[in-house]
Amino acid sequence: MDAQTQTELDAAVLRRLLTHLDGRKDVQNIELMNLAGFCRNCLSRWYVEAAGERGLEVDLASARERIYGMTYEHWKERYQQPATEEQLERLNASRNKS
């Protein structure tokens, strides 16, 4: 497979992941962190980093809007639930492993 095709496939997979996450607003970031070790905020930071590696300047707010499909503030207002004690304990335990 040539590099251009690989890049196109990678981009298609990211778009599908974002569409999937957009349809699963019930899945909280803390749950993603606890299960997969990354969340929507991680994707936003990776987006900023990837842009920077290519000499582009993308601020975190713009990256979050791309990943969340809306402003981060709007997403938090509408969809973010308070973390449970169990979720926080699992997050802290996973951070202590690294």
Image (tube, grey):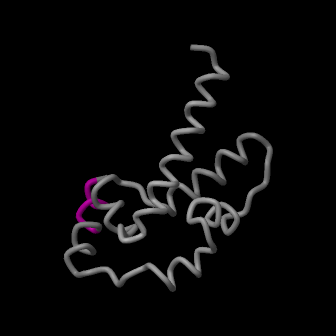
Residue 74, placed above or below residue 41 = below
Foreground of the two, 98 or 34: 34
User: Is residue 87 found inside the magenta-colored segment of the image?
Assistant: no
Picture quadrant where residue 95 is located? bottom left
Q: Main secondary structure of the magenta part?
A: helix
- The relative height of residue 1 versus residue 92 in the rendered view (above or below) is above
Q: Which residues lie in the magenta part?
A: 92-97
In the figure, is residue 65 to the left or right of 91? right
From this view, report whether residue 65 is shown above or below residue 2: below
Residue 37: where, in percent of width, then height? 35, 54
Q: Is residue 23 left or right of residue 68?
A: left
Residue sticking out furthest to the top = 1
User: Left of 86 or right of it: where is 52?
Assistant: right
Total number of numbered discs in the rendering: 0
Q: From the top left corner, tell me how far across and down residue 93 is, in percent.
A: 23, 64
Q: Residue at x 80, y 43 (%)?
A: 55
Q: Residue at x 54, y 44 (%)?
A: 14
Report the quarter where the N terminus lies.
Answer: top right
Instruction: Name the spot of residue 87 as percent of width and height, x first.
Output: 25, 73
Q: Quadrant of residue 44?
A: bottom right
Q: Position of residue 82 (x, y in %)?
A: 35, 84
- What residue appears at the point 50 percent right and 80 percent down from the top-left corner? 76
